[in-house]
Amino acid sequence: MKKSLKKAARLLAAVLALCLTLTGCSRGLSIFSNYRRLEMVELVRTITVDGAEDGVNVAIYGTAGEKQEARMYQRTGPSIGVAMNELSLLPLGREAVLSHTEELLIGEDVARERLDEVLDYVERFSETRLDIGLLVVRDSAAWELVSGLAGEETPASDVLAGLSRSIDRVGQGYIFSCREIVTSLAQNGVALIQCVRGVQEEKLFENRGDLNLAPAGFAVARPDAIVDFLTEEETLGTMLLLGKYRSKNVDIPVDGAVLTLSVDSVKPEIKPVFSRDGALERVEIRLTLGANVVCMAGLTDLRQAETRHRAEDGLSQRFGDALTAAVKRGQAMGIDFLDLYGILSRREPLRMEDAVGKNWDTLFPGLPVEIAVESTLSRTYDIIDPPEISGREEGDPWEKLTGSLKDN
Amino acid sequence: MLRGKAKAPAPPETTSNAPVTVAALEAVFEGCYDFESRDVHIGGDIRRKARLCFIDGLVSGSDVAQQVIRPLTDPERFGAVTDTKAVISMLLGGSVYVYTAKSRETLGELAGDLLNGFCALLFDAERTAVTFEVKSPQRRSVEAPREEKVVKGAKDAFVETLKINTTLVRRKLRNTHLKIREFHLGRRADTSAALIYIDGFTNPSIVAEAERRLAGIKTEGALTSAVIEENIVDNPRSPFPQLISTERSDKFCMNLLEGRVGILVDGLPLGFLAPGTFSQFMKVPEDHAGHFLVASCLTLLRYFSVALTLLAPAFYVAVAMYHQEMIPTRLMQSMIEAKQQVPFPTAVEVIMMLLAFELLQEAGIRLPSPIGETVSIIGALIVGQSAVEASVVSPVVVVVIALAGIAGYTMPNQDMGSALRLCRFLLVAASIALGMFGVALGCAVLLYHLSSLESFGVPYMTPFAGGQGRHLSRALLRHSMTEKRDREPELKTEDGGEAKL
């Protein structure tokens, strides 16, 4: 064969070999096994795991496009892996894609018995993201709750995503991601998980189902299972200390009126106090709150310092109680879910090591904890205390208003 | 004109040292129908003849008649002069009204003059010819640039005539150090070219290298720009342009002032500048006309456009086929929705659209301008929209390809735009095969190739690679004219690279 022909043949072979790699249209020859046809994908956004007689019941909620009907697929298997494997190939050859999953809801029974299996699956499976929010469903099966959220035209996953975001936003709770939970379990041996329950409510929107999602406090989890549930007040105290608290409106009664305050700034400061011989004497927790007056029902003179102080004290009392309840619950359980040891160790690493060593678990339940809460109220100006306007009538407007009200 | 059986005429031996005779000259130009020769009676005396030769069309007929024939046949001027040598002496001394007169004694020189718009008077007995420059004025006048639009700047673009182009440069750089060296390119076409640089400023090694490469060009004729570019660049196989080509004389002069050498070729309305570096292809003369902040933002936008035009289709293919987790959920839902009715896989869709885009562009360029624009509009609007409505392609693909195409149009240099288009196809192929890994691999290969390129000894990717990092801002931004600024250090200008204010 002539040299030029050989060269041409080699080139042709190289081009043909290259063409083999252009296998986007056929999975069989693809170099890269991750290939999926976009039009055959079922986008899963919510997964629920509930207990079943012979293992677990896994349900996935997916859509095959924006305008397509949302579908729920359910399988039961001896383990989550097996059930998910059966769900991977859906009817009509559709393929479930888990990479867009936003929430994973588990029933209380699964949380108590198979939490480690759930977290392990999320961690190991290459497709699931670690920032999936994990929720424990109380008082009902997880799939029932999710299905009950869906409206006629709105997929359950959409409603769930909106509702779970609102839990964070209005300061009713905090949805920890699988990553946060696993990290906390690995570092502290304990983690918190947001609980929810379905409540029957009058439909707020037409596109909603019969159920609404209500936060139900935090669950305290050990690596293998849920240990206990916190009350609403304990949950609030926990969120305040962990820095997960979002702005929430709180009603504080002052002098016969009710002030609605928006707590916008929460700064916890936790420090250890050591005795002269270096032993850990107590823990001081100082919480600094900054709140704005949102509105006022009834009449009280916020221009008076005493009135403001009473309002600030009321707020401090409210949040101090929540904080105390959370600390006491942790001490009673003997579980440091507030991660006080971690916070104190980061602040005073050497002295904490000398004073506590590996005895934190025995020290913690009986450790004195002093809690102090300081609140500052702002936006206390009054609608009847207008700025200087030329030509206005002389006299105290407050006195005039209250006087006229009394007269009436 | 040749009649009968077509036979390729032998090219004139313009380098011949043969003595000048009428017969020899006519033999050289045998078969050239535009070659004209006639006898002229010196001083009106029919006994004394000279042979007037010229190439019809290259010379101005009226100039020949008025400035050469008329004074030559004037009995009062030449009637008393009987000695031919004296006639030649008078002709060279200014007895005819032509400012350039040369005495030629070899056939090569004579033919060269004739081909360059001279007419010649041949004196057989003396074996001598006197040539006069009487070039035809039929040439395109200087106009505004057509390809490189000007908003705030000089509107005198290069034309096809070398002399006019050198004049445009000389008018902008009135400096005795501006040197214009003449070269002749093409074994058969003998095209004039000029190497232009600023003596005592431009790096002498770049000048010497340019001279060497120009002298080394072996071609039949330098009639297209590719002849120059491919013969003198360091790596002619690379699709990336390594010579800056421009039709704008202001851009040409600005680069001469930066320390580059310029090349002008007769017959090409373009100027070439060397060395050409990647960052130079991202700049337009308008950058120096507008405010420096705006110019800097636009330069950064052009770099962003490079990334967009190169990577957008490949990135789309990779995420749509292999890495769906990278797509935001809402977008993914609408993409799935749009893809439901499309019968082709993503890879086919994208390649099909890229090809359609190239077809439309090619059709738009080749057709006359009004029709070309119509084709583009029909293609972009009607075909694109119809294709989406007919579910042949999904709308996202149209958006991605259109974005990549529009980003490509922001390239100031057409050659750079074409190179990027070619690389776009290769990156799409790599992403079809290997997804995001293929894109990364393709980018690595591309960067390796670009980093290994050199133009006249200057790294192509300077100052990003192979240059001095501290000059990075010079490539990405346009500094204020009031600031002290450095030239490209890689050009090694003889003033040390510091621009004096």
Image (cartoon, rainbow, N blue to C red):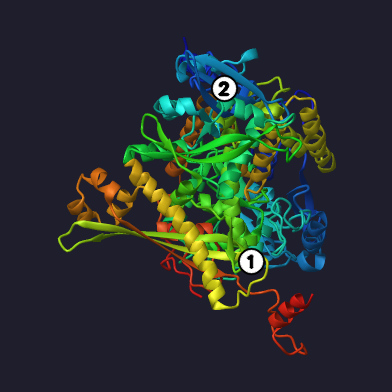
Q: Which is nearer the eye, B126 or A22? A: A22
Q: Which is nearer the eye, B25 or B261? A: B261
Q: Residues within 10 Å of mark 1 (few under 14, many from 20)?
A: some
Q: Which is nearer the eye, B38 or A144? A: A144
Assign a secondary structure to mark 2: strand
- Which chain does the numbered disc 2 sit on? A
Name the residue tied to disc 2: A59
Amino acid on which the number 2 mark rests in the picture: Ala
Name the quadrant containing residue B103.
bottom right
Where residue A363 appears, x then y in whole percent? 24, 48
Amino acid on which the number 1 mark rests in the picture: Ala
Name the residue tied to disc 1: A257
Q: Residue furthest top?
A: A1
Q: Residues within 10 Å of mark 2 (few under 14, many from 20)?
A: many
Where residue A67 appears, x then y in whole percent? 73, 29
Left or right of A332? Residue A165 is: right
Where residue B403 appears, x then y in whole percent? 67, 41
Assign a secondary structure to mark 1: strand
Q: Please tell me whether residue B125 is drawn above or below residue B398 in the rendered image.
A: below
Sequence order check, earlier mark of 2 and 1: 2
* Residue at point 69%, 80% (across, down): A398
Are both tags, 2 and 1, on one chain?
A: yes
Left or right of B248? Residue B240 is: left
